[in-house]
Amino acid sequence: MVRIMYFRMVVFQVILLIALSINAYAENRVILTGGVLAGQSLSESKWIIYVEPNENIKGNIECKTYNNNSPDAVMPFGYTWTWGRRESSIVTIDKWIPTGGRYWDISINLKAPFKTGIYYIIFSTNGEFNMKQVFSSTSWVYKRIVWHDGNDFHDMDDNDLLFAHENGYVSKWPYLNDTGYHVANVPVMPIKVIVK
């Protein structure tokens, strides 16, 4: 009798752990897993690099995307950098990532800005047709892309991006669709670049 009760308890705990792990990634997310950028190691906990003005920022970023949309939903994946022109400083890594989890190893080759300060490289994916829609936070149903309205990814502040580093998404970000602005959780993985 004791063995049966123990067995049931163990089975219950395993089922609970599986359910919690599935629920933990119920949102679409992008999670940093490693890499080396500008000669500095990155990991799930280390997401900040220090560079000199105009220094080459070369290396690779390792991350994992979680796409919980249906397989017929387009989900592009890419990155932008906050010292570039927001409308054009965009790299598309994949035009349509698969449903489920996937690991990525991404080559980066950027030039640090001339001015000292805090900047970001921001990775994201979302259910849009292209990365301009994603980084401008403009839904494809709006019919045109709107920049400089206060909800571009370049407008995310340090608190938003710290939350994204810890969780794989930005919570309740304003997103423009055909009925106006609505808050949504958007998948975001930042790399903080401090130019000293």
Image: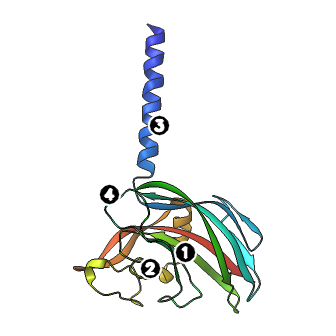
Percent of width and height locating residue 155: 48, 83
Q: Secondary structure at mark 1?
A: strand
Amino acid type, residue under disc 1 in the picture: Ile
Q: Nearer the viewer, residue 83 or 183?
A: 83
Q: Residue at x 41, y 47 (%)?
A: 23
Q: What kind of residue is marked 3?
A: Leu
| Label located before the other in sequence (2 or 4) | 4
Inter-mark Cα distance, 3 to 1: 31 Å
**Image quarter in which the C terminus is found:** bottom right
Q: Residue at x 51, y 60 (%)?
A: 167
Is residue 97 depicted above or below 10 in this figure? below
Give whichever of 104, 175 is nearer the camera: 104
Q: Which residue type carries mark 2?
A: Phe
Q: Earlier in the sequence, mark 1 or mark 4?
A: 4
Q: Which residue is mark 2?
A: 135
Q: Residues within 10 Å of mark 3 (few under 14, many from 20)?
A: few
Amino acid bearing label 4: Ser
